[in-house]
Amino acid sequence: MDELRAISTFIRAAELGSFNKVAAAQGTTPQAVSKTIRQFEQHLGVRLFHRTTRNSALTEAGQRLLASIKPSLDGVVGALARARDAAREDEGLIRVAASGSIGRRVLMPLLAEFQQQYPNIQIDLIQEDGFADLVHDRIDVGFRGGNPPEAQIVGRRLFPVQQIVCATPAYLKRHGTPRALADLAAHRCTAYRQPGSGKPMAWEFEIDGDTVFHHVQPVLLSNDPDTEMHAVLSGMGLGQIDSINAAAAIRAGKLKPVLTEFVSERMGCYLYFPQRADMPGRVRRLIDFAVERLLNSKQFYINF
């Protein structure tokens, strides 16, 4: 007899509690289902169901058999699903989460290159600050700058994110260049508003191996890094801008870094994704592609 077919029919009958429902689900007749179960019982030499005219219920032996074989069958079904997915690893949808600056400056060039190689893979990009809830939001891969992600997900630091105090050359020519943290009190400064408290985020420095936080009195307070960046580019004052946003402007001479001996590299750009054994092949392709292109990248880093 076809044991796999018999096992599948047995599990379906146990779950649905009715041979008629199994027949409807399988597109066959109740008599055919009953015959398959009867042959399976004869093959095993044990009765699996108590039958009535409308319903069926597992015997004790049937319950033991179901508990023994269902996990193994679920594993086979999962393996077959993964095999089918692997055959389609170059097509389908990937949901990606990223903060605004990383989405615009880091991911857009990366995703454009990725889709040139894999044109049948679509990207659904969700841009928001903070770590996305991967499970609740059905996110496949996330990118974020800041601290490491929580332990329940897989995270990888791609490159350090520097906190660079900078201003336009014109501003520094008018107001002078600060040489010590105490000099900042005499300067016009911008700051980023903390999402939770609404207070200005302290500037961060590394001094003798320790992280030191310094509060400034901002002439501009913004909850958008790009807005703060444009304010500094317009000559409004000094700003502590992360290297993802500042690196290109510094290399172009539009901004000049100061207090470079105190630049903090505590934060990083992280790639993170949920722990799962059945990761789709297309998602694994994007992760590998991002790591290959961005790991230890100097594009968003300034050597002082």
Image (spheres, rainbow, N blue to C red):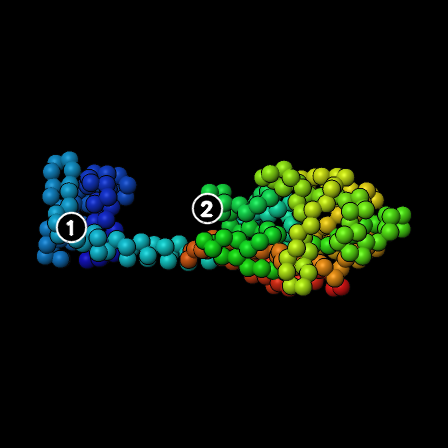
Quadrant housing the C terminus: bottom right
Q: Residue at x 61, y 52 (%)?
A: 145
- 10 Å crowding of disc 1: few (<14), some (14-19), many (20+): many
Which x, y percent locates residue 183? Answer: 79, 51
Q: Is residue 3 left or right of residue 243?
A: left
Which secondary structure lies at badge 2? loop
Count up the numbered dots: 2
Determine whether 107 is above or below 198 in the image.
below
Going from the N terminus, do you reach mark 1 or mark 2 first? Answer: 1
Dot 1 falls on a residue whose secondary structure is helix
- The residue at the far front in this view is 182
User: Along the horizontal axis of the image, is 48 left or right of 150?
Assistant: left
Q: Residues within 10 Å of mark 2 (few under 14, many from 20)?
A: few
Residue closer to the observer: 256 or 87: 256
Residue at (66, 55) in percent of width and height: 212
Residue at 72% across / 45% down in the picture? 216
Quadrant of res 243: bottom right
Q: Quadrant of residue 156?
A: bottom right
Residue 282 in view in this figure: no
Q: Mark 2 — residue?
A: 135
Q: Nearer the viewer, residue 75 or 144?
A: 144
Query: Which label is found at residue 62?
Result: 1
